[in-house]
Image (cartoon, helix red, strand yellow):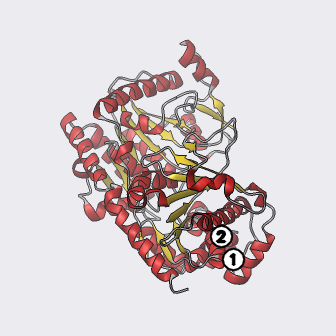
Amino acid sequence: MLFETSWEVCNKIGGIYTVLSTKARELKKMLGDNLIFIGPDVWADNNPSPTFIEKKTLLKSAASKLSLPSNLSIRVGRWDIPGSPIVVLVKFQSLIGNLNEVYGQMWQEYGVDSLHAYGDYEESCAFAVASAIVIEKLTAHLRPTGHVVAHFDEWTTGMGLLYLKSHQPQIATIFTTHATSIGRSICGNGKPLYEYFEHYDGDQMARELNMESKHSLEKAAAKNADCFTTVSEVTARECTQLLGVTPQVVTPNGFEPDFLPAKRTYNIQRKSGRERILKIASYLTGNTYADDTFIIATSGRNEYRNKGLDLFIDSMVKLGESQPEDGRRMLALILVPAWVKEPAGELLMNLYHDGNDHPEIPYLTHRLNNEAYDSICCRLRELKQSNRGGKMDIIFVPCYLDGHDGIVNIAYYDLLPALDLTVFASYYEPWGYTPLESVAFGVPTITTDKAGFGQWVLSNFTNSLDQSGVFVLPRTDSNYLEDASKIASAAGAYMNASATVRTEARQAASATASKADWVFFIKDYEEAFDIAIKNSEKH
């Protein structure tokens, strides 16, 4: 029986949601209903989870029969994704503010320093410990005859692993870090990760960057798990250097082909998506866009430097300024969630009432609460004031594309077919789901060798938009301007290529993605399960 715990079970926040939701069907084939995902119950009657279907009688009616301490409660159902696995949502909030005894135990047994905690630490630990208690109680309630494995994702669930280790050591544990908290922090604070990589000490950097609690928890979980895994060789090296623990297994992230539309649907989505994008852009910028406008996009987590959003913007400026005056206009989209306040009023009026109001901010589809300080807004405002960009218009779409944002109103996966090219110029990217999703939808992509996906492409395919649908750039701490020029050059060459070449590139992208099917990658998880079970039997 496998329990897998993550903040992103039925709760889409970032890339881990894609990991879990796309691998579920292969795990379900292997384990049937002995696969149980555990996620946070952060929903309300007026804001239900869109992917959770409650089924109260599952797991021997555990929702009503399980005796849980500290006013914890659960809901049981199925996750509305391919495979429809069983899900347990945990109402953990009663533990927040009541963890001092657990913190003391974690310090005494594992050296976890919770004294310097702040931000989301307490909430994460409350969910993690509540999940461990639920796993403990469910195991006793269900009495499975085989091995029991508990898989915890990211530092946010690490305390659950340690709690289970102390209370139920016979349950095999797996800990997966999708990105080390200290590595992400080093990059996010503008420090050069790669030139000084071998000289960084994780504990020292945690003290310097006020990351002691998260780092010590992650390090303890990695050290004490029966099997420690990560998602790429890039991050495995990072774990060895910054956590002092080398993962036993690398588990690359795959993709589930059931998420892809049929060809007829794809063509409809491409046509309607392009029409919507170009309509929004014309109302927003006041420019006219031909049907064959070249549309480039980036997306993902809003980490300005780590995700290469700075490099994307500057490379798009270079591309725009490299085109002749009589050349066609191009459109670059930044599809990155930010602190949204509301849809831009003038744009809304233009779209739904065929108005001609000139938007106050001609590069922003939704108004933000922090426009004066948002890094993307600051850079786009600077470019606009200096009249930079040439034939390129850059538009910031700062909302989750769930199909109900008020402006685009198309879900992200349904919008992907409308794009001609994507760019993910990551400086720090443990795996890189966004470029994998792009090529899965037949959209060629430019990424970097600092992404695990980029390294996987370099190891298995020809590094070329034409031949694999992927162009992987080398990123260092000192080649920013060089990479901006390379991105602009590669994107420009692809834009100006013949229709035949671009069609072949889209086909090559799909072929590359087909090799990242979970069918090929699930074997690495099987290895992790075996290691965890063998090590747990030594206790």
The tag on residue 112 is: 1
Residue 442, x across and y down, in percent: 31, 42
Report whether residue 74 is seen. no
Residue 388, x across and y down, in percent: 49, 37
Query: Does residue 168 appear left or right of residue 530 in this picture?
Result: right
Query: For residue 337, what is the image quadrant?
Result: top right
296 shown above or below 216? above
Query: For residue 6, what is the image quadrant?
Result: bottom right
Report whether residue 109 is seen. yes
SS at mark 1? loop
Q: Are marks 2 and 1 in contact (CB under 8 Å)?
A: yes
Mark 2 and mark 1: Cα distance apart in space? 9 Å
Residue 230, x across and y down, in percent: 47, 68
Query: Does residue 469 appear left or right of residue 400 in this picture?
Result: left
Residue placed at 55% from the left, 27% from the top?
Answer: 407
Residue placed at 37% from the left, 68% from the top?
Answer: 524
Task: Please state which of the two labelled residues, at mark 2 or mark 1, is closer to the viewer.
Answer: 2
Which amino acid does the dot numbered 1 rest on? Val
Q: Point out the tag, 2 or 1, that comes first from the N-terminus.
A: 1
Instruction: Look at the image and tell me in which quarter the C terminus lies.
Output: bottom right
Which amino acid does the dot numbered 2 rest on? Met
Residue that mark 2 sits on: 159
Q: Nearer the viewer, residue 399 or 486?
A: 399
Residue placed at 51% from the left, 55% from the top?
Answer: 16
Check disc 1: other Cα within 10 Å, few if <14, some if 14-19, many if 20+. many
Check disc 2: other Cα within 10 Å, few if <14, some if 14-19, many if 20+. many
Residue placed at 31% from the left, 53% from the top?
Answer: 471
Q: Nearer the viewer, residue 239 or 344?
A: 239
Query: Does residue 14 appear left or right of residue 460 in this picture?
Result: right
Residue 110, x across and y down, in percent: 67, 81
80 shown above or below 464? above
SS at mark 2? helix
